[in-house]
Image (tube, grey):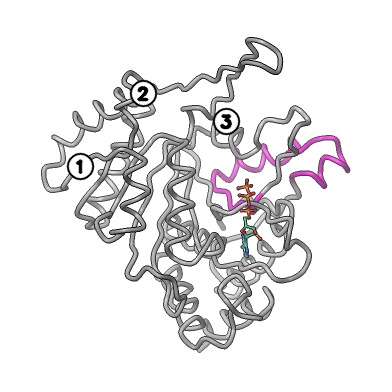
């Protein structure tokens, strides 16, 4: 039996996580979910945001399903998300944004996958105070090895998933050396994939084009910071953060999570939309070679949304998290 490390997280994390595990359990797969408390509540209880038992479990299981974790602001903590991505060398953050049935937005037929480099750029967190309260410098790190990995991952995904085009997103007109290197590596690698159309675009133009002509995008690949921002934009195109899953893949470990944060404004109210984490669980099932079951869940989500009467408040409904999950489970048994 394959064990999965499940991190319950903070804010809406535990609510959506327990519902997703409940849905996965109904499929009766050969999977066992090892649940762990992490984050702020854990820090209060045991003095650590992520206890060592969690790291032991991750190192044993190698596959993680993670609910959002709050990094306490202004207490000197490094982002837990960034720490996990670095510790396990999860260099590829893949965020597929696909229009969902009956979720009305001004945009139709969106199907865009963002490949976000996950281990460097401004997220290395190297900041220096040059003059207190006057001047701070932050380091943007771009390396050939990390850039090659994410760009190759995007092209390989395009081949495997029969996608047609990859756009490299950058700001090389200003950041001539750092983004210049990323773009140069993209142009080197694209030559090895002649069947995939490859172009590049400056990040500010990408933001405008995404809301004017989103259908011109297929796969986008970019450094860490742009990936964080642009993928939130793509979630807006399909109806909001409650719908966007992500996988974080390295050579040895894989972590699946929702793109959204812990949403403290709606925590504990049984209102959160579990779809993003559930779709992340589907990406995990694909990864674990259960594509049929992953598609069963995706079809159940689509059916419930098409039927329309049970939807959470973020997608203009009144259903609770539990009611939505119950509806998914009912569809899985049809
Ligand atoms: P982080 O910095 O950790 O990414 P954030 O400050 O960007 O977090 P989120 O926690 O992602 O914010 O929430 C942004 C908004 O989206 C909030 O108003 C929140 O209620 C809403 N939201 C996020 N996730 C969900 C969800 N699963 N269901 C419903 N609403 C959500």
**Earlier sequence position, callout 1 versus callout 3:** 3
- Distance from Cα at disc 1 to Cα at disc 3: 32 Å
Q: Is mark 3 within 8 Å of ligand 1?
A: no
Q: Position of residue 316 (x, y in %)?
A: 58, 77
Above/below status of 33 relative to 314: above
**Residue beneath disc 1:** 199
Residue 80: tell me if it is visible.
Answer: yes
Left or right for 24, reference 323? left
Q: Is mark 2 within 8 Å of ligand 1?
A: no
Look at 48% across and 63% down and name the residue there. 282
Left or right for 75, reference 259? right
Residue 4: tell me if it is visible.
Answer: no
**Earlier sequence position, callout 1 versus callout 2:** 2
- Residue 317, by quadrant, is bottom right
* Mark closer to the observer (3, 2): 2
**Residue beneath disc 2:** 175
Q: Secondary structure at mark 3?
A: helix
Above/below status of 198 relative to 306: above
**Residue beneath disc 3:** 87
């Amino acid at each position: 039996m394959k064990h999965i490390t499940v991190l319950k997280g903070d804010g809406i994390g535990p609510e959506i996580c327990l519902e997703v595990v409940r849905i996965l359990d109904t499929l009766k797969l050969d999977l066992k979910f090892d649940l762990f408390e992490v984050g702020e509540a854990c820090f209060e209880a045991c003095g650590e945001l992520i206890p060592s038992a969690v790291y032991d479990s991750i190192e044993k299981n190698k596959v993680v399903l993670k609910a959002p974790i709050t990094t306490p602001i202004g207490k000197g903590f490094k982002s837990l998300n960034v720490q996990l991505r670095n510790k396990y060398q999860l260099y590829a953050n893949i965020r597929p944004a696909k229009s969902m049935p009956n979720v009305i937005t001004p945009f139709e037929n969106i199907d865009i996958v963002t490949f976000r480099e996950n281990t460097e750029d401004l997220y290395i967190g190297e900041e220096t105070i040059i003059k207190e309260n006057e001047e701070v410098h932050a380091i943007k790190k771009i390396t050939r090895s990390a850039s090659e990995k994410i760009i190759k991952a995007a092209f390989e995904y395009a081949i495997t998933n029969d996608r047609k085009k990859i756009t490299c997103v950058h700001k090389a007109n200003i950041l001539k050396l750092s983004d210049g290197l990323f773009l140069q590596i993209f142009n080197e690698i694209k030559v090895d994939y002649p069947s995939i159309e490859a172009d590049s675009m400056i990040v500010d133009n990408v933001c405008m084009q995404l809301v004017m002509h989103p259908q011109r995008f297929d796969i986008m690949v970019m450094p860490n910071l742009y990936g964080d921002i642009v993928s939130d934009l793509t979630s807006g195109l399909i109806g909001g953060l409650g719908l966007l899953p992500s996988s974080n893949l390295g050579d040895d470990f894989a972590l699946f999570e929702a793109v959204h944060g812990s949403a403290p404004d709606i925590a504990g109210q049984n209102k959160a939309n579990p779809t993003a984490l559930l779709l992340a669980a589907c990406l995990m099932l694909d990864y674990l070679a259960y594509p049929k079951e992953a598609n069963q869940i995706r079809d159940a989500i689509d059916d419930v949304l098409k039927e329309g009467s049970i939807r959470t408040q973020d997608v203009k409904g009144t259903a609770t998290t539990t009611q939505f999950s119950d509806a998914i489970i009912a569809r899985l048994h049809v």
